[in-house]
Amino acid sequence: MVASLLVCRMSVARYIYLVLGVVLVLWSSILALVSRQLGTSLPFVHSPRVPWKEDDHSEISPTKKFATSFSSFSTQLGIASEVYLISLPWRQDRRQEMEHLQASKGINWTVVDALNPSDIAISHIFERIVSQRSLLPSEGHQDDLGSVFRWPADINAIAVSTEYFEASGSDLWTSADTQDSNHTTSPSLSVSPHPNVTCATQDHSVPSFKPSLPDWMILTAPKVSCWYSHIYAIRQFIDRANTTPEDVAVFLEDDIDMERDIETRMRHVWPSLPHGWDMVFLGHCWSNESFYPALPSPQAMSPSYDVLKRSYIHPSYSPRCTHAYALSLSGARRLLQHLRYPPFAYSRALDQAFSWLIESGRLRAFSVVPSIVIQRKVLSSDIFPGSGVGSAWREHLVDGVFGT
């Protein structure tokens, strides 16, 4: 009798499990069908610390179609239509080194004169920063999320638009100060530094000043100058005539070395980029940019591909340093809108801004690992005057032009 009951219960249990399995399969099929019908896709702004990527990147077949194409004008460094070198006019020591690099690699770049840190415009920017921070709400006026900070709702629409990119936000802070193309002022117009302004974190969290704060938490004139100079270069890329959506620009600083075979490396990794990418770091510092798995590359199946010299491209994690990066045209328009938004503009060092925009899902960024462009750090630093050649971060190339 007991044996019969056990057999009966086991039969019922198997039947229940079978029914549940059928229900789960049917439910999964229905969800998949609905998703295809609705055309659902990953949202642009995603949760922090989750890298943006396209669906169907987990498996690559020999016939997989990669989204990124090359412009007919992509003649610079293998992938770019434009290259900009950002350099302070008086750093002739650095410019001479860059002329050697330019001749060695045959790069046709545009030199962008960086803004003098003692320019009167820097003082006006600091005044605007302080004014913006005075508008931050008190604790009693914050919303349920703890902040009233809101990014403009039209950033994505403007990024992919072909309409003229009008001046706005912090673009207007210095329009009367820097009329000439060299961005220079006479010594009589130079201004004193602002030693008690701190670098913001996240969207607009501003720490109080303390004498014990490290240098990277203090907002200085050279950091503001760096921000302004990169914006100016990005603006040149955006404002060109006859732009196309496939255009890519590379932005370099004047203290770099690069791999001799950088064109080959770029051509190998570039097809892995998903459609809609914004930014690619050709070099970085102070971050583990291999934290996320590398994107698969169709070039890996080529018998002539040298695995020992292979570069990989990863979703960016938290890259620092601004010495070498690439922007798509839409990525440049998207980035510039963030950088000129008054509550965020000039709020910290530029690389801290890049890192936060990536971490918070505002930019679709990727990093080449290992770096194919690095900082040489053999000449004095412009960002940290008096600190020697800069931070302690060091990298080496496989076969750099300068042997770095």
Image: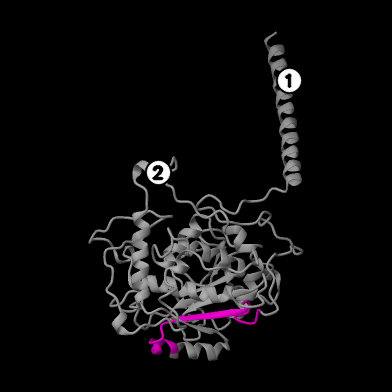
Q: Nearer the viewer, residue 327 or 192?
A: 192
CA–CA distance between discs 2 and 1? Answer: 60 Å
Whether residue 91 is in magenta: the answer is: yes
Q: Residue type at mark 1: give it.
A: Ser
Judging by the rendered image, the residue that carries numbered circle 2 is 142
Residue 294 position by quadrant: bottom right
* Residue on which disc 1 sits: 11
In the rendered structure, which segment of residues is drawn in magenta?
Answer: 74-95
Residue 401 got which mark? none
Q: Earlier in the sequence, mark 2 or mark 1?
A: 1
Report whether residue 288 is seen.
no
Q: Position of residue 255 (x, y in %)?
A: 43, 81
Residue 55 found in image quarter = bottom right
Marks 2,1: beta carbons within 8 A: no
The answer to if 221 sits in the magenta stretch is no
Q: Residue furthest top?
A: 1
The residue most toward the left is: 211
Q: Secondary structure at mark 2?
A: loop
Q: Is residue 129 above or below residue 384?
A: above
Image quarter (top left, top right, bottom left or bottom right) of the C terminus: bottom left
Which residue is depicted at the point 54% across and 60% down?
363
Q: Type of residue at label 2?
A: Gln
Q: Quadrant of residue 78?
A: bottom right
Which of 231 and 365 lies nearest the eye of the viewer? Answer: 231
